[in-house]
Amino acid sequence: MIAYVSVGLLGLLALSIPVGIVLFLLGFGIDTFFSSFPLTRGLGNMVWSSSNSTTLIAIPFFVLLGEILVRSGVATRTYAALDRWVSWLPGGLVHANVATATMFSATSGSSVATAATVATVAMPQAEKLGYDPKLFSGAIAAGGTLGIMIPPSINLIVYG
């Protein structure tokens, strides 16, 4: 069986089929030929039991909260306030990025949402003030990674 799986895996990957599809095909192919209990009988119950968790309802609410903060203008006003607060520091706008990312991370729970929101608000300001786009984008990316580390984050909820 291991030989069949190895040959099938390498053969399908050699055909440039995406890895996820290869694993799906191998899983159902091996199940059809080598299993006494079909995978398709237990698949529905397994998918339903893993997705029927009250804890996981927080994930779409985090996404909704992030969207509300962007659309309502709260992110823009927060960024402007933090820019005024840290503007006396050298590179004050970069510090405002990290501070805004910290505050938004604590509410959104997602690194991607944090980086996207701060970038949407901060990049026009950076271009206006003549900051280097590479340096500024790096500061946004670094601030965005706080989304996964500051609880409650989506990943901590899923891992918990």
Image (cartoon, rainbow, N blue to C red):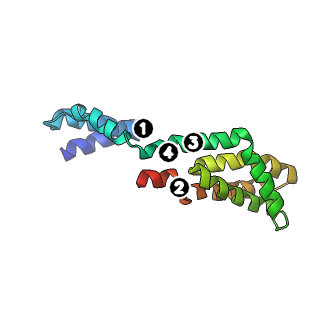
Residue 138, image x and y in percent? 68, 57
Residue 83, image x and y in percent? 80, 57
Residue farthest to the left, as pictured = 36
For the residues labelled 3 and 1, the Cα–Cα distance comes to 28 Å
Camera-nearest label, 1 or 2: 2
Crowd band around label 3 with a 10 angstrom C-alpha radius: few (<14), some (14–19), many (20+): some
The disc labelled 4 sits on which kind of residue?
Ala
The image quarter in which residue 64 lies: top right
Q: Specify whether 155 is left or right of 12.
A: right
The disc labelled 1 sits on which kind of residue?
Pro
Image point (68%, 46%), residue name: 117
For the residues labelled 1 and 2, the Cα–Cα distance comes to 33 Å
Label 3 element class = helix
| Mark 2 or 4, nearer chain start | 4
Camera-nearest label, 3 or 4: 4
> Up-down: is 76 above or below 12?
below
Image point (22%, 37%), residue name: 30
For the residues labelled 1 and 4, the Cα–Cα distance comes to 31 Å
The image quarter in which residue 43 lies: top left
Residue 125, image x and y in percent? 82, 50
Q: Which mark is residue 58?
A: 4
Q: Specify whether 31 is left or right of 49.
A: left
Q: Name the foreground residue: 11 vs 100.
A: 100
Camera-nearest label, 3 or 1: 3
Image point (53%, 55%), residue name: 152
Q: Specify whether 141 is left or right of 158.
A: right
Residue wearing tag 1: 18
Label 1 element class = loop
Residue wearing tag 3: 63
Residue wearing tag 2: 152
| Mark 3 or 2, nearer chain start | 3
| Mark 1 or 4, nearer chain start | 1
